[in-house]
Image: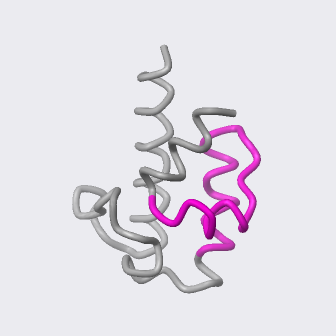
Amino acid sequence: MALDRRTALTTAAVTAVAGLLGIEAATVRTDTPFSDLGLSSIQLARLTAHLEDAMGVEVSLTALFDHPDIEQLVEHLAMR
């Protein structure tokens, strides 16, 4: 069950990042920091809203800085 949750969280995060950047989801690396992916601070703020809608959990902007890539963020969210 935990693996399914992580997969769902990862898919939601990849989809949200790809949408914000206007790129294909398949090109989003989950181990690349959000800043290296090209997300601006405004896009990071939007990302929290996208993730909250898609995942049904609260995601603070601070969480994106504390867990600066998709893999770390998903691990954090999966533990909640």
Counting from the top left corner in percent of width and height, residue 59 is at: 71, 53
* Left or right position of 50 against 21: right
- x%, y% of residue 8? 46, 33
The relative height of residue 73 versus residue 55 in the rendered view (above or below) is below
Q: Residue at x 40, y 54 (%)?
A: 14
Q: Quadrant of residue 64?
A: bottom right
Q: Is residue 43 a member of the stretch shown in magenta?
A: no
In this rendering, position of residue 57 left or right of residue 40: right
Q: Return the residue nearer the eye: 48 or 76.
A: 76
Residue at image location 37% in from the left, 76% down from the top: 37
The main secondary structure of the magenta stretch is helix
Quick check: is 48 in the magenta stretch? yes
Residue 20 image offset from top left, x and y in percent = 48, 71
Name the outermost residue toward the top: 1
Q: Residue furthest left?
A: 27
Percent x, y of residue 5: 50, 27
Give the magenta part as a residue range: 44-69
Query: Which quarter of the figure is the C terminus placed in?
Result: top right
Give me the residue at 30% from left, 63% from top.
Answer: 28
Residue at 58 percent of width and 34 percent of height: 78
Residue 50 image-quadrant placement? bottom right
> For residue 36, which quarter of the picture?
bottom left
Q: Using the image as rendered, state which of residue 67 and residue 39 is in the foreground.
A: 67
Q: How many marks?
A: 0
